Amino acid sequence: MNKKSISHHHYILGIMSILVVLVIALQNSDTVTVRFLFWGFEMSRFILILLVFAIGFLSGYIFRSARKI
């Protein structure tokens, strides 16, 4: 496989991952209580799933960029 083909596969995999996360998030709209250390607050499970996905994506991007340096 050439580099262009691999890059194309990454875009397709990324789009499919986002679609799966959106479907899961849309099906989980209940309110949940989130507790972290001394704090506790309620939020939609939809927002929580998207937030966790975004944190995972950003941390993967940052660590991947740091590894290239």
Image: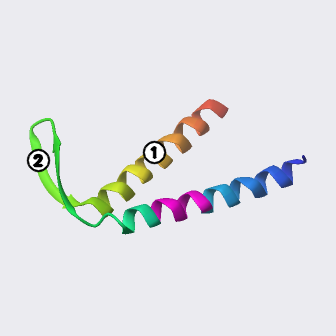
What's the amino acid at mark 2? Gly
Please state which amino acid type lies under the numbered disc 1. Gly
Q: Is residue 50 left or right of residue 60?
A: left
Residue placed under numbered mark 1 in the picture: 56
Q: How many marks?
A: 2
Tell me which residue sits at (23%, 64%) in the image: 30
- Mark identifier at residue 40: 2
Q: Position of residue 8 (x, y in %)?
A: 77, 58
Where is residue 63 shown, x and y percent of the image? Answer: 54, 35
Image position of 38 with respect to 14: above or below: above
Task: For label 2, count other residues whose C-alpha is less than 10 Å away and answer few (under 14), some (14-19) or many (20+).
Answer: few
Residue drawn at x 14%, y 35% as measured from the top left = 37
Q: Earlier in the sequence, mark 1 or mark 2?
A: 2
Residue 69 visible: no
Residue at 62% from the left image edge and 57% from the top image edge: 14
Q: Is residue 41 left or right of residue 5?
A: left
What is the distance, in whole Å, between disc 1 and disc 2 at their CAs? Answer: 22 Å
The part of the chain drawn in magenta is 16-22
